[in-house]
Image (tube, coloured by chain):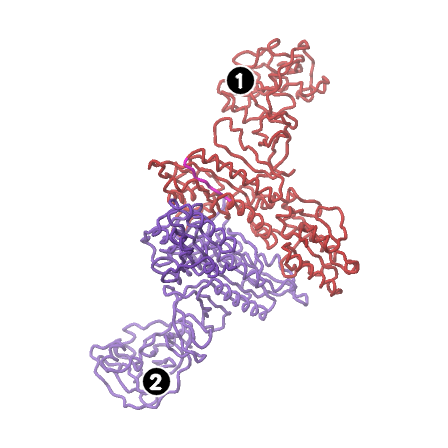
Chain colours: A purple, B red
Amino acid sequence: MRLSQFHLRTTKETPADAEIASHRLMLRAGLVRKLAAGIYTWSPLGLRVLRKVEAIVREEMDAAGAIELLMPSVQPRELWEETGRWEKFGGQLLKLQDRKESWYCVGPTHEEVMTDLARHELASYRQLPVTFYQIQTKFRDEIRPRFGVMRAREFLMKDAYSFHLDDAGLDAEYRNMHATYSRIFTRLGLRFRAVQADSGAIGGDASQEFHVLADSGEDAIAFSTGSDYAANVEAARAAEPGPRPAPAEAMRSVATPTQKTCAEVAALLGVPLARTVKSIAAMSGDGFVLALVRGDHEVNEIKLAKVEGMADYRLASEAEIATNLGCEPGFLGPVGTRAPVRVIADREVAAMADFVVGANRPGEHLTGVNWSRDLPEPDAIADIRNVVEGDRAEDGGELRIVRGIEVGHVFQLGRRYAEAMRCTVLDENGREAVPAMGCYGIGVSRVVAAAIEQNHDDAGIVWPEPMAPWRVAVCVINPKQNPAVVEAAEALYRELQAAGVETVLDDRGLRPGPMFADMELIGIPHRVVVSERGLSTGTFEYRARSAAAAENLDRSALFALLGAGR
Amino acid sequence: MRLSQFHLRTTKETPADAEIASHRLMLRAGLVRKLAAGIYTWSPLGLRVLRKVEAIVREEMDAAGAIELLMPSVQPRELWEETGRWEKFGGQLLKLQDRKESWYCVGPTHEEVMTDLARHELASYRQLPVTFYQIQTKFRDEIRPRFGVMRAREFLMKDAYSFHLDDAGLDAEYRNMHATYSRIFTRLGLRFRAVQADSGAIGGDASQEFHVLADSGEDAIAFSTGSDYAANVEAARAAEPGPRPAPAEAMRSVATPTQKTCAEVAALLGVPLARTVKSIAAMSGDGFVLALVRGDHEVNEIKLAKVEGMADYRLASEAEIATNLGCEPGFLGPVGTRAPVRVIADREVAAMADFVVGANRPGEHLTGVNWSRDLPEPDAIADIRNVVEGDRAEDGGELRIVRGIEVGHVFQLGRRYAEAMRCTVLDENGREAVPAMGCYGIGVSRVVAAAIEQNHDDAGIVWPEPMAPWRVAVCVINPKQNPAVVEAAEALYRELQAAGVETVLDDRGLRPGPMFADMELIGIPHRVVVSERGLSTGTFEYRARSAAAAENLDRSALFALLGAGR
């Protein structure tokens, strides 16, 4: 492509409402332009990137045996009534009426349309297993669209749906899709993790999210150095703690007149924060509860709610605390409490000796506290905390915490949609069977933004090569003054193209500074400068986008480096 | 592709509501499935065809210098208010409100979004001319969606928009797009005509439609054998008639007691219908009018309305006819009328001698009527009729009339959108200039249906090769009984694929009858049968979809025929 024949429009302005790097850079590089809140036009440059992602997704889905089709965007209400989601989906569902006053929605997802198609198209077990997919524009009416295409209302998605006679078939395809997604994100050149979306402790179908790792990611992810285990921080589990040490100290009271937090108490006493215990007062259906976690840990509300009797717990009020412990917050502790007060200890707390807790008296804490000796064993011991960086993982490795952006999701739907919509096939024995379903999504347009979050610097985007709008930029210095330079650049451009290297020729006649700035902003991986000086020495100035400096290469070295050798 | 790994679902049932061949065949071949009125899912098979069309359109648009982008589907009301089309577009505009109760529409076209983009992205004449295009899903809320994807509500369209500093630039791009469309439809293998959409007699910007020719087409098209002139029948013009012959007969009255139509009178008198003249009574702003066309011609209302004074004409009532001519309909004529009755003669009528007209007396006609001698020359002479098959064309050729399906449209919008939306660029002199615009559409999904209307037989679809889901079908006879046949078929399949011939292997194990019927129904251009008998003679049974019979070919002849030689 000759840039003079293309529409490139970069800007130095940083839009005021762009909060994150990808949003700023996508606007500055002119990849997208906002039409309305959460609704964007993809410019010619942006579309080139979007199509790169789309093509890799399509190739890998095809290679995995999935079959592409194309479902409509506008969907009739009746189907959504069958699954109960017309109401349940909530405000993200963009509803509308046509001229006959029939209700439709602009599809935010396609489980209903797909299951409707399946109940018409699939009749026999011989047609199973089968996986259909599409790459299609969707709409979700987000309350607060933001971050550009990262959380847009209209977006491009690859969604896939599989049908199986039995759960083993679903499992197999789930693993196939998991492997396919790993190949897709690997081919895109992204650092990513497949993450357990839920701890799965209470039944539920398998579900994993694929996250592109980036410091700006909305989700915190814990992963193990010992295996490919990864989970949302809220769902992650650390290893069981080691055995409880024997008591070494006597319990004694210390004055903590103004020290209410574990950190303040630890500082006052000169002990590690990990020796203190935090007491959280809560009310459950069974009454007053003290939940204990180490001073350097945080309670995980989801995990705590999974402890027996805690499903609907809430934090206790100061009045309830006063009634049950006779004390104000800041000095609470388990020592001396009696039924009906229930003590739930995190696994780590139950394995502690000689720890520090509040004394249930204002301005006073207890040190050297030990289970059994100074207070009864906890009423319940459970994993009720968030993991932290450095925790030991269940696989023996160490947990690390990174931030990620969800770009994909694989999910075992089971039979809920097929049952609700009466989708059946005849099995080997001629009996009607409800197929098990899986669904598998990739946010195609979001991948573009996530890639930028992960790969950028002060000068702009640093595309992974497979996503770059072009691999190579050939920049012409002073074209108007130097016909020989233009000729050499044109020749190089044609030769690179002929060698299969996707190249853009910057023949716009800009001065070198703005031209290089543009190529850096839009993130072209390889830049080759054709200048009078280079011609005189038989070299080209080459610089990789990610490199600190340029180097001069002769033609054969340049072509070898760009993989266009011979 | 192995069909056993694909999802093909054909049916013998002819859906009751499918009125035209393409609709029936698309459902029977399983190319699409209806989700709601005018809303269709494209099956894996259908999508393959749709993508073929899309790819050719994209290649040719790119080659023509147009630049692809992707605009949103959901569009804010404000833009449509600027052009006044929020109201004017009418019921086809699918309006909706988001959760904040702001109004949007699901885009039926993109002039507003494009012009909005242009006013932000285009600043200087140096960026012009430029043509943007997209291939995108649109929605028009048709009153009566029908004919399957031919007149669907949700459909896939290629729409392009060009911007120019001056009209000459617009003209040049209009011609470029016209040529591009001709290449696209030629490459698709379709018989088509570029048709003048309007006579253009009263100003107006240039506009042409591209029609795929098919007997079932909704539009009648006149084209000339003498050039590439073609126009909608309503807009088509024939050549000027020759000079008026000298009178040869005396005018006389004949009794036509029950003969009211020209055909009845001609039959009674034994004269050609072309010797009779039809008198149409109308009321215009200036009063009563008799419009005259030859008995074998039809008045063209659009042309008649363009005659001076006739802009708002309507047909006269029987009372008005009685008042002005003293006669009932069926026996009307221009002889003996006086001002204020105005006589407008079609050019052909003005060139007639010795013609037959009503006598303005019940049960009576006049023969041998001649201008000047028997009645004054007409008050106005104009082209006020529809052309008919066999008319002489203005280029000296002969007019033929065929039926067509509109699949494309090129249009000079001029400056109406840019002016309404205050889109300007700076010209060479630094002054603000409103750019001229063109727009250019192709109904991508409609092309698929139109191709079938043009290319089908009793057995099913007969795809033009460039649109076929696969070029070649390799059919395996009795695979379960014949491992050698399966092996040979697999080898042939792999070799054809390796030679770049897009091939499908029908390895489903169907009996030959249903297997061949499927391949004919879905319209695969070339069928190769691998059977035990063929193996024993070293031949393959080959049949072109359009051929009457099969033939036996050896491998090299087969590969040569399929263009996979060597």
Q: Which residues are magenta?
A: B158-165
Q: Position of residue B226 (x, y in %)?
A: 62, 29
Q: Which mark is residue A69?
A: none
Residue type at numbered disc 1: Phe
Q: Main secondary structure of the magenta part?
A: strand
Give how far apart the Cα atoms at labels 1 and 2 are: 109 Å
Left or right? Give the position of B493 relative to A157: right
Left or right? Give the position of B381 relative to A241: right
Return the chain for callout 2.
Answer: A
The answer to whether one can see residue B361 in this image is no
Q: Position of residue B114 (x, y in %)?
A: 43, 43
Residue B389 occupies quadrant: top right
Residue picked out by circle 2: A352
Taking depth in this image into account, of A386 and A460 the one nearest to the observer is A460
Identify the residue at the far front of this view: A536
C-beta proximity under 8 Å, tags 1 and 2: no
> Can you say which quadrant of the picture contains the C terminus of chain B?
bottom right
Instruction: Please determine whether, in this image, residue B197 is positioned above or below residue A513.
Output: above
The answer to whether one can see residue A317 in this image is yes
